Image (tube, rainbow, N blue to C red):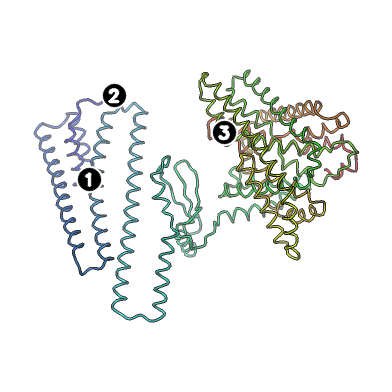
Amino acid sequence: MKVTGLTPLWTLLSLLCGHLANAADHEDVVKHAIKLHRGKGAVITQRKQWVMESCRKLSGLLRQKNVVLSKLKSAIRAVEKDAGLSDEEKLFQVHTFEIFQKELNESENSVFQAIHGLQRALQGDYKDVVNMKESSRQRLEALREAAIKEEMEYVELLAAEKHQVEALKNMQHQNKSLSMLDEILEDVRKAADRLEEEIEEHAFDDNKSVRGVNFEAVLRVEEDEANSKRNASKREVEDDLGLSMLIDSQNNQYILTKPRDSTIPRADHHFIKDIVTIGMLSLPCGWLCTTIGLPTMFGYIICGVLLGPSGLNSIKSIVQVETLGEFGVFFTLFLVGLEFSPERLRKVWKISLQGPCYMTVLMIAFGLLWGHLLQIRPTQSVFISTCLSLSSTPLVSRFLAGTVRGDKEGDIDYSSVLLGMLVMQDVQLGLFIAVMPTLIQAGVSTHSSIFKEILRILILIGQILFSLAAVFLICLVIKTYLIGPYYRKLHAESKGNKEILILGISAFIFLMLTITELLDVSMELGCFLAGALISSQGHMVTEEIMSCIEPIRDFLAIIFFASIGLHVFPTFVIYELTVLLFLTLSVVIMKFVLAVLVLSLILPKTSQYIKWIVSAGLAQVSEFSFVLGSRARRAGIISREVYLLILSVTTLSLLLAPALWRAAIMKCVPRPERRSST
């Protein structure tokens, strides 16, 4: 129902001014305004009298405001001409007057904005939800801007107060003689003030006008503890240190990353508690899995499930835990590369390159076929297929830990083929992430732009191939000229002190992952290549470095597998158990069959027997599907339901992987090697 016969704008002005003049009559003013608007229950004389009175109040307020502004200008001129005031006092007083001027002007603007909002609401249709939503959004934006202006005024008042304190201190110093200690402390105070001004970044003022920056309303939450005096004082300290948690309207939680005052050391106690809790609970969970014959990594995943959102929900710093867990992947792949010598890499590089590419193409083809039958969008089918084509490198690395290389002369080691194919899949992961923006655009593009999207994908593939060539050229230079002298220098400096050796190797790992990241290749490949380069220095070097890095890898791997458990939702799996088991078995069987088919074509005849073991190692879904799935969900490529299905299928496939691996080992590996590999 559209509202017709609107009152003039000056009537609305009068209505709101009457409300401002006497807030206690708010309800009566509203009722009277409705009567005036509808023309019911109010005679013309009463209406005119009420309008005239409201206009009189409005004009009186505006005249009073103009008079005050004139007096403020005169006061500012008088302060500036007063020779008896110091510069600090003048600055403080002028600043205070200017803030008051701004407050008056902002109050007047708020009145007119409220009037325009009321007029817009009266012109709207109360049945039109979209119109009401737009009005609510505009009011929310106005409130956000008002809050920002109020914050700025408050900061300015704090600055003015600081100037006043400075002026008072200067006056006191001029009126009394200072001792030597007081003079020293005064010099230190001035140096500290200069230091704060130098290191303060003014990030809020610098970024509030940047394009794409939005003002949001957030809640500041203190830790929920007992209301004792000790905890109350603790919360006051946390408030001063900025360690509270912020929650926005979308239920995203934020913690402090960089404080305003960098001179005070801070620690994120939420993150510390999370790591301590994971470390304590991982021990019984891993112990239990060892007792029943499962790999300990599943105990760590169970630990994450128990502590995550689907369990006790005690992990507060989920993003920070996942970030630390990524270092577990880095060091795991480094140790994999350390055992994967360049000689073995040259022996299987063709199989490692061809196998994953053929498997990915076949998975995408099957995905498009099923997507066409089930009427799924091509972009969604391609994405789901590429996610499911990846296999878990950390999991298989744990399977291969301690494997005996008992192959005959001329045969190909199954662990070399398996690790080579997994590393190539890590390279494909970087390609998938690079192509994802194109998939997003392809999902909303018209048929006339399909050729352009295909051309963009081909260009991206060319860039990735160029980056790979550059990476391997850099590796060749490092192996030929740098890695030998670098390790000998580390070994000489670290005699009797392993700290330098560990630090030097870690720095080399981070250098290689930085290089591959800058070249738009996955960081995981850089970690693997770092290990392969160091392994070229000989078996003794490999053993020494492995003994130093393995404890670090083991701890970080616990965090990584626990972070996977944070994204496992048992209730969803239980609700859809039948569907998920069918999908998981279908994916595992399909990947196993495709791997057997591809390896039958590319493996030499003398090494055909290893295709069953390699296929068993590839017949699960990589935990990196969590990363790809989360990005695709945020980008709108897949829905929430598909995302949960990918998470659940990935988790169940990882749980089935040990059983399939053991079956393949029992069938194909001789007994002496079988005992070591299981």
543 vs 229, nearest the viewer: 543
- Give the percent coordinates (x, y) of residue 183: 39, 77
Disc on res. 1: 2
Q: Is residue 179 above or below residue 660?
A: below
Is label 1 or label 2 in front? 1
Local crowd at mark 2 within 10 Å, few (<14), some, or many (≥20)? Answer: few
Q: Amino acid at mark 3?
A: Ala
Quadrant of residue 630 within the rendered picture: top right
**Quadrant of the image for the N terminus?**
top left
Which element is circle 3 on?
helix
Q: Amino acid at mark 1?
A: Glu
Quadrant of residue 624 within the rendered picture: top right
Residue 19 horizontal side relative to residue 450, left or right: left
Which element is circle 2 on?
loop
Please say whether residue 652 is visible from this viewpoint: no
Local crowd at mark 3 within 10 Å, few (<14), some, or many (≥20)? Answer: many
502 vs 468, nearest the viewer: 468
- Give the percent coordinates (x, y) of residue 240: 44, 60
Give the residue at mark 3: 632
**Quadrant of the image for the C terminus?**
top right
Identify the residue shown where x is 80% and y is 54%.
Answer: 543
Of the image marks 1 and 2, the number of the one nearer the N terminus: 2
Identify the residue shown where x is 58% and y is 49%.
Answer: 320
Quadrant of residue 408 within the rendered picture: top right
Disc on res. 4: none
Disc on res. 108: 1
Q: Is residue 216 above or below residue 82?
A: above
